[in-house]
Image (tube, rainbow, N blue to C red):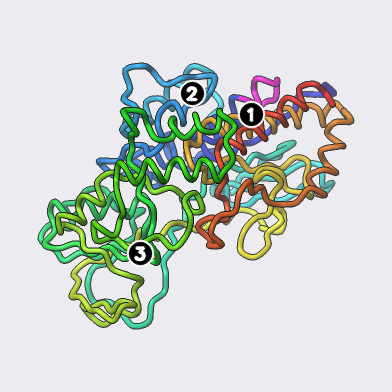
Amino acid sequence: MKRPIRYVVIGAGPSGLAAAKNLREHSIEVEVLEREHDLGGVWNYALPSGRVYRSTHMISSKRGTEFPDFPMPRGIPPYPHHTQVLQYLREYARRFGLEEVIHYGCEVQWLEPSQDGQRWEVLLSDGTRRVYDGVVIANGHHRRPHWPQFPGSFHGKAFHSAYYKTPECLRGQRVLVIGGGNSGCDIAVEAASVAEVVFHSTRRGYYYLPKFVFGVPIDRAGEQLHRLGLPLWARRWITQGLLWVLVGPLQRYGLPRPDHRLFESHPIVNSLLPYAVAHGQVRPKPQVLRLDGTRVWFADGSCERVDVIVYATGYELWFPFIDVRHLNWHQGRPWLWHHVFPPRWDNLFVAGMIQPDSGLFGLVHWQTQAVAWFVRRWWQGHRVALHLQRWRQRVGPQYQQRRFLPTPRHWIEVDHWHYGRTMQRLVARLARGG
């Protein structure tokens, strides 16, 4: 290589750790800038940026989540607790010597191209400036909570699920949980054990998948259908048949009928919500219509008195330290080739900005492997990088293997099987050199 390449990785969560490890394996000098005092990102319960609550377990299995070159220990259960995930990330960092390149308490204030347009200048919150040959943004997409706006005002207590830790704050209260995602379902079930009553408001009906199918984690069972080469319609038909046998029609529990086909929305993996609804512990409600003091009106015309509202309404894509034009920002989100490569820049990348229907870590491994190979080939002046530059401008900005619901929640949704295979093929092509 012409000279040592120096890259910066923003964030020391799972995506940032994978990026640093894979770049270093290609002899690229790396600094990881982390604004918190510890690694782990959303999986670190003790950090302000942590997004796990005391009882959080993974909703993807350990085998469907782990880094392919660093398996999770056998002693960890199929669905690890958040403390086990954090320990796994610490061991990953130690195994690959990443602790020596992580700089804690370094918050990136601003990021912009250098005057010659060949490098990137990074301004830190303490006023210092640093210059790097390239940047991998790995700050995650669970940073800025999304707050929906409803007519009227609420006079009780309200907070976002990002700040939920234990159910004690809901004890004896009349609780409304808004949001049909995995966090909303978990919190509704957990609140039912301590609250006076729990209402659960969702915009639509969803499919609720059990965590196990015949003793096998459901994402592992789903992967077997992929390995058989079955088309989407066949996988949908088989899975719906299993759900009919194992769960039954959701309307019998008192849940609304789904208004979409299976696999068209992010999977809700929760074995307990139908049980809690059937026992009257959680009362389903349609979308909120308006707020009126301590009362909440719903789309079906019903009204309930509520003491606490928990907004489990997801997060917004947010990059406060960079002009979003550099990320090809359109219609409220970045449009990147394979969710990683901006079409304009050859030394700016985003890692982990996907929401897969299984685990994330393995997919981020292949994302950052592709980034590392691209950087190496580009720095060597290899023609394959020039080809990829043209491809990412021509193929299209967004990767979608199948059609998901047209909602902001699904902007970065990917089919883990097809997306993973796509990234592996890209890595193989870069490794071959053409």
Label 1: how many Cα within 10 Å (few below 14, some 14–19, many 20+): many
Q: The residue under label 1 is which amino acid type?
A: Val
Q: With 59 as the anchor, is 130 left or right in this view? A: right
Q: The residue under label 2 is which amino acid type?
A: Ala
Q: Please identify, in this view, whether the residue under mark 1 or under mark 3 is nearer the observer.
A: 3
Q: Secondary structure at mark 2?
A: helix
> Could you say where residue 293 lies in the image, as x and y percent from the top left?
24, 81
Give the quarter of the image for residue 53. Answer: top left
Label 3: how many Cα within 10 Å (few below 14, some 14–19, many 20+): many
Marks 1 and 2: in contact by CB < 8 Å?
Answer: no
306, above or below 103, in the image = below
Start and end of the magenta stretch? Answer: 22-30
* 3 or 2: tag closer to the N-terminus: 2
Q: With 321 as the anchor, is 95 left or right in this view? A: left
Q: With 259 as the anchor, is 300 left or right in this view? A: left
Marks 1 and 3 sit apart, C-alpha to C-alpha, by 44 Å
* 1 or 3: tag closer to the N-terminus: 1
Q: Please identify, in this view, whether the residue under mark 3 or under mark 2 is nearer the observer.
A: 3
Front-lying residue, 247 or 3: 247
The residue that mark 2 highlights is 93
The residue that mark 3 highlights is 202
The residue that mark 1 highlights is 30
105, above or below 315, in the image = above
> Could you say where residue 414 lies in the image, as x and y percent from the top left?
57, 45
